[in-house]
Amino acid sequence: MFQALSSQILTNLGELEGDYRAFHLKNDIAQSILSFSIASISMLAMLRSDSFFFKDNPDLFMIMAISRIIYFLITIFVMIVTLKTTKVRTFDRLVSGWLFFTVVYIVLFDFTRPSDYITTSFAIIVPFAIYMLSPLKISTNFLLALGFSAGILIVEYFLKAGIGSVPISGAIAAQLVVHALGFGSALQLQSYRRKSFKAYMEEKDAREMVAYLANIDPLTKSLTRRQLFNISESEFLRYVRYHRPLSILVIDADHFKNINDSYGHHAGDLVLRSLSLVALEKKRAQDTFGRLGGEEFGLILPETNLEQARIVAERIQKTWEKSPVNLDGEMIHSTVSIGVAEANLNDQSFDDVLRRADRMMYKAKEAGRNRVVTE
């Protein structure tokens, strides 16, 4: 029943469930550390009341004192391990194990308490604290809280003598109320947190999409000139620092104006888009391809010397030559001229390499087009 109720109230995160838990892991750890601290301090503080209730039985008081110190040390150990935890699954196991240990500890030691001791307060506080302070799943918290309540009721009202039916009814009613309040409050808190995370992720995705669209040329789906230059400058700085090979291709569509004049601008757009797709297919994952302007594109090739870059350029040139564009059944043939340059120690900036590659591209044009020219 509680699963059906929680599924109606809690926001379903689907594939984001793992991201949601990982995103809140640090906060969950901090919340758990607070719970560990409160529990351990409270357990030591109970030694004062133990000394009062067991003043006539020093042996039993000693057992209680030792057990509380052991509980304190175990809690401190779990706290230290939890602080170093980086995985959600490990965190869940630690917290659920500690909560189970705490519930069993309190229920078992209720046997040593006189009836009507502060058990009534514990019976109300502990279940509610589990619901409100535990970062575990609501179903897990429900089972832990329910187990505690059942254990306390069995010990207090069935295993101890002298308790009448009226207190039993009142205790059961009080437990039902605290579970209803705790479970409802936990549902509201979890729902708010999940909705906030979902809204955060949607906003983050929207910002990333805006940034992506701002860096992508809408016609050719390649990088914009600005983004291409940003990446190229970074690659050039890496070349300066580590002296690793860096080459660039400048690719220009031949007789592009004639295509626009003969077939219309729609055909020209189609040719540029198709050329961009061919270059994107032929480049490597680490290469960067973008539009320099008009019918001119640039391809940045890190870890690539001049000869290797020439091979890439010829592959693009030959593939494009054999890839006519279909415009309503009419095949438009086009070629490209490509200039290739490699960065050298005399270059002061990426622009120096780009200018040399651009000059090589114009030499390819002057030599008859549909070819690759290197330095």
Image: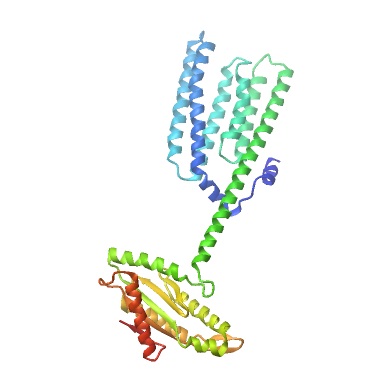
Q: Position of residue 209 (x, y in %)?
A: 54, 61
Q: Is residue 341 above or below residue 90?
A: below
Residue drawn where x is 54% and y is 58% of the image:
207
Q: Residue at x 41, y 81 (%)?
A: 315
Q: Nearer the viewer, residue 289 or 159?
A: 289
Q: Quadrant of residue 76?
A: top left
Which color mode does the image show? rainbow
Q: Where does the image place residue 362, in percent across and percent down from the top left? A: 37, 85
Residue 221: horizontal and vertical position, in percent?
Answer: 51, 72
Is residue 114 shown above or below 293?
above
* Quadrant in which the C terminus is drawn: bottom left
Q: As drawn, is 217 to the left or to the right of 173?
A: left
Measuring from the top left, give residue 79's x and y in whole percent.
45, 34
Residues 257 and 307: in front is 257
| Left or right: 5, with 212 as reference point | right
Q: Is residue 60 visible?
A: no
